[in-house]
Amino acid sequence: MNREISKINYKIHTDAIKEYLLQNLTNEQLSYKYASEVDMLNVSLFNKRAKQWRKENPDLNGNMRDCASINELLVLANMESYNAVLISKGIKQKERMIELRKLARTQLLSIEKLNNTGLKSLEDK
């Protein structure tokens, strides 16, 4: 179910790419642009590109997102939505990556703190 949530947000993300970043591109350029945006999210969250992950994990089925934790998938879904907003505002990729890395780190830390303390206190109520 968690992987499905990130797939839904992936659609939001790709729609923003299609609407704002893909004017006058060839089919080859279109493929590269989508892959470039996805890899930017991968690097922002996982600190590696999909190709690097596959090389490091040849025995695992699927991709890095299929092997991600629930916390990482939640943050990834948020990153895809936020990147769609940044794209629609005309923010360049380099600047978006900086913002997305900050978002990923902040949210992962918040979720980790919640997992360590917050959920227990919520269950006690």
Image (cartoon, grey):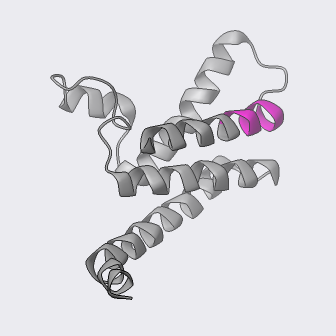
For image coordinates 81% across by 38% down, the residue present is 20
Give the residues in magenta: 14-21
For image coordinates 63% across by 58% down, the residue present is 95
Q: Is residue 15 in the magenta section?
A: yes
Number of marks in picture: 0
Which sits in the foreground, 63 or 115? 115
Q: Position of residue 97 (x, y in %)?
A: 56, 54
For image coordinates 36% across by 49% down, the residue present is 46
In the rendered view, does 113 fall on the left or right side of 9? left
Q: Is residue 103 in the magenta section?
A: no
Furthest toward the front, the residue is 125
In the rendered view, does 87 fall on the left or right side of 19? left
Quarter of the image that includes the C terminus = bottom left
In the rendered view, does 120 fall on the left or right side of 87? left
Residue 15, quarter of picture: top right
Which sits in the foreground, 49 or 7? 7
Q: Position of residue 105 (x, y in %)?
A: 42, 67
Residue 11, quarter of picture: top right
Question: As displayed, is residue 71 above or below residue 63?
Answer: below
Q: Position of residue 81 (x, y in %)?
A: 65, 51
For image coordinates 36% across by 77% down, the residue present is 114
Which sits in the foreground, 50 or 77? 77
Question: As displayed, is residue 69 above or below residue 108?
Answer: above
Furthest toward the left, the residue is 59
Quarter of the image that includes the N terminus = top left
Question: As displayed, is residue 95 above or below residue 39?
Answer: below
Q: Position of residue 24 (x, y in %)?
A: 84, 20
Which sits in the foreground, 14 or 89? 14
Q: Main secondary structure of the magenta part?
A: helix
